[in-house]
Amino acid sequence: MAGSFIDTNILIYLASGNEEKANAAEEEVRKGGTISIQVLNEFSHVARRKLNFSWDELTMLLRAIRGCSTSCH
């Protein structure tokens, strides 16, 4: 549903190695919605600490999320 709230888990699934979860998460982000600063901070923390993303990888993914959430719906 457009205008919904996108939580941290959706972003984690988007970055996961699980293709099925990543595809479902991408579809949710494409529908549009609100992503709070807190969710972005939580996602960044998990991406760096648990998913072992470099700062460059994290920056690229956050840019892609921003671009998709603002122009893909």
Image (spheres, rainbow, N blue to C red):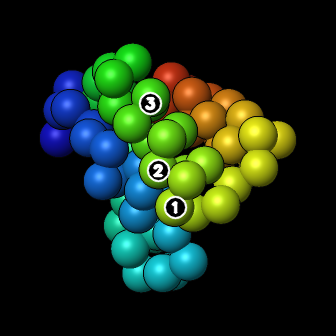
Residue 46: numbered disc: 2
Tell me residue 45's x, y (percent). Answer: 49, 41
Residue of label 3 = 40
Say which of marks 2 and 3 sits in front: 2
C-alpha distance separating marks 2 and 1: 5 Å
C-alpha distance separating marks 3 and 1: 15 Å
Left or right: 58 as drawn, with respect to 21: right
Left or right: 54 as drawn, with respect to 48: right
Q: Residue at x 69, y 55 (%)?
A: 53
Name the residue nearer the viewer: 47 or 1. 47
Instruction: Give residue 43's quadrant in the image.
Output: top left
Residue of label 1 = 50
* Above/below status of 68 relative to 66: below
* Above/below status of 56 relative to 16: above
Q: Residues at badges 2 and 1 in contact (C-beta under 8 Å)? A: yes
Comes first in the chain, label 3 or label 1? 3
Comes first in the chain, label 2 or label 3? 3
